[in-house]
Image (cartoon, rainbow, N blue to C red):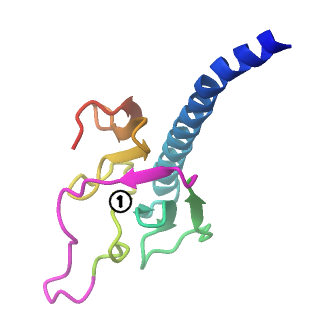
Amino acid sequence: MVLLLIVASMVAPRMSSFFRGRALAAEARRMLSVINQAQSKAVAEGVPVLLWIDTTRQRYGVDVQTGHASADDRPIEFTAEPSLTFEVPVISEHVTSEQEDEGFGFPEGMPAIRFNPDGFFEDDRAVKIIIRQGTEGALEIAPTPNRLGYEIRPLTAQP
């Protein structure tokens, strides 16, 4: 019985870090699926689709861009596990009209990726998404080299 207790005390810390790492990988896979769904919806319905990321509340989702009709207007929204945080390096600030009275359908104060009806995404705003789990690890979801989709990669360069 003592031997079993000793083995359990040695294995428990490693198992807990294993399960925490699984949460990071699972969230990255779920976000990649949502990205693929947004891209497919833009092509299938012929409307611009936004993938928005709320980095303060650890939420993300998909909406058809404001001003466009869609066959399925139900918003898709997910909330990440509390131990995870999102970072989205924004390439450029909010694009506004000449009179600066409208933001062209982008969510106010949140980074977003717009998928056009041709399936391509605009790379003048948020492109890469970093998912962190404390100080233990991080993954990034970034465009593939051919810029036709996204992929999950280990975060190589720390910001």
Q: Is there any visible trace of residue 74 in the rendered image?
A: yes
Residue farthest toward the top in the current orientation of the protein? 3
Q: Residues within 10 Å of mark 1 (few under 14, many from 20)?
A: many
The magenta stretch spans residue 21: no
Q: Is residue 149 among what the camera can see?
A: no
Q: Quadrant of residue 66?
A: bottom left
Q: Which residues are magenta?
A: 81-102
**Quarter of the image with the N terminus in it:** top right
Q: Residue at x 62, y 67 (%)?
A: 72
Q: Secondary structure at mark 1?
A: strand
- Residue marked by disc 1: 114
Decide which of 144, 128 is in the foreground and name it. Answer: 128
The residue nearer to you, when weighing 1 against 106, is 1
Q: Main secondary structure of the magenta part?
A: loop
- Considering every residue shown, the one lying at the far left of the view is 98
- Nearest the viewer among 47 and 104 is 104
Task: Say which amino acid is labelled 1.
Answer: Arg
Quarter that holds the C terminus: top left
In the rendered structure, does residue 86 fall within the stretch colored magenta? Answer: yes
In terms of depth relative to the viewer, which is nearer, 152 or 100? 152
Residue 56's x, y, as percent? Answer: 42, 66
Q: Splitting the image into 4 quarters, where does residue 132 fall?
A: top left
Q: Residue at x 27, y 85 (%)?
A: 102
Of all residues, the one furthest to the right in this rendering is 1
Residue 13 percent coordinates (x, y):
60, 27
Measuring 71% from the left and 14% from the top, which residue is drawn there? 7
Q: Position of residue 84 (x, y in %)?
A: 49, 49
Q: Name which residue lies at 56% across and 44% down.
A: 30
Pinpoint residue 106: horizontal percent, then vertical percent.
34, 72
Relative horizontal placement of residue 41, taking residue 122 as reference (left or right): right
